[in-house]
Image (cartoon, helix red, strand yellow):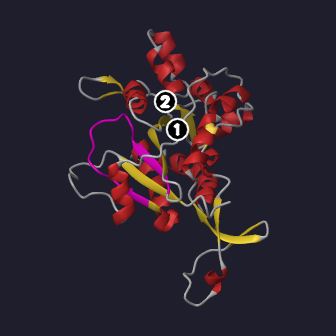
Amino acid sequence: MLCHMARNFPAFTENFLDRSATLQKSFREETITDMLMANIVALGGKNVVVDFPNELSTGADMEWNFVDRSDGSFVRLLIQAKRSYGKGKQWGRHSFRELYHQSGTPKALQAKVLCNTARAAAATYPLYIFYVPGKTCKLARLDNALHVSGVTLADGYEIEKLAVSASDRKTRTKNRSLRTISEKMFPLQSLFCPQSINKLGPMMFSRAAPVGPLFLDGASFGYPTPPTPQKICDAVNRLNDISERNGVKSTVKQPLEVSFIIPEEIREVLETGKYSSESKESNTLCKAVFISHSDESS
């Protein structure tokens, strides 16, 4: 189900942003992020726990935690969202105008806050998620930029380099442009596809068994589950390969590795099925725990 969402939500976003252009209100990235999280809640079932707690600034709009109950492994993604703006047929000049936004106390580049937060934590990696209107995507595809779509991801460390190096007006314009950013994009399904499938035993077909969707996986039937922490690590560690296919030489970084120490806050979610109810003054961060079972998945 999450894989299906990852393949279809980008097209929905393209159409939604196109239609919103005719309204009096311009929808920002927060709206798309809320809808993305709503889809994850609806499709993830009991294997995904979502909340919107008040948090100190981490530079992120979303925090996705992946846990494997089978081996106790854990990995975290910190994700900052930006949407593109622009008119005219030169799609490459459309830009993510808020790329240099500052946050935290004292004020610092949001990209740097995001990456520093990830650097200071175990099994944590920064990503950017970009939302692009359909009209812009169509122009890009006509120009053979086929990897541009309504929702894409990018390596946070690569975006940090663009933000930090933008020291003059010309570089600031270039580094936040869609043409520059597009070279670092990779599809949302890189994380959620192929879908992990939990195999079903004979009891699944008894009257006492829970009713749920069945999928054909080779010779096995099963139900979809979120990707394991190890699969997330593998996907993140392939980012350099994706960038190189887009013609960009990426800096080789320390591979992301899973941790076998699950943070106390996440342990509480696993035990209670919800986040702590403490301090809910603002909804500035979307947090999710994706729960998998590697000994049952294939």
Residue 135 in view here: no
Q: Secondary structure at mark 1?
A: strand
Residue depicted at x 50% and y 36%:
127
The alpha-carbon separation of the residues under discs 2 and 1 comes to 8 Å
- Label 2 vs label 1, nearer the camera: 1
Position of residue 86 relative to residue 296, above or below, is above
Q: Nearer the viewer, residue 78 or 164?
A: 78
Query: The N terminus is located in which quarter?
Result: bottom right
Q: Quadrant of residue 234?
A: top right
Q: Position of residue 30 (x, y in %)?
A: 40, 45
Position of residue 39 relative to residue 183, above or below, is below
Q: Amino acid at mark 1?
A: Phe
Q: Secondary structure at mark 2?
A: loop
Query: The C terminus is located in which quarter?
Result: bottom right
| Contact (Cβ within 8 Å) of mark 2 with mark 1 | yes
Q: What residue does disc 1 label?
A: 130
Q: Nearer the viewer, residue 94 or 184?
A: 184
Residue depicted at x 47% and y 16%:
172
Q: Position of residue 259 (x, y in %)?
A: 48, 43
Q: Nearer the viewer, residue 185 or 122?
A: 122
Seen as rendered, the residue at the extreme right is: 219
Work out whether mark 2 precedes mark 1 in sequence or the reverse, and give the earlier one. Answer: 2
Query: What's the mark number on residue 96?
Result: 2
Residue depicted at x 53% and y 64%:
43
Q: Position of residue 46 (x, y in %)?
A: 46, 67
Q: Position of residue 61 (x, y in %)?
A: 39, 42
> In the picture provided, is 240 more to the left or to the right than 81?
right
Residue 200 in view here: yes
Give the residues drawn in magenta, as a range: 49-68
Residue depicted at x 51% and y 63%:
44
Label 2 crowd bin: few (<14), some (14–19), many (20+), radius 10 Å: many
Q: Amino acid at mark 2?
A: Phe
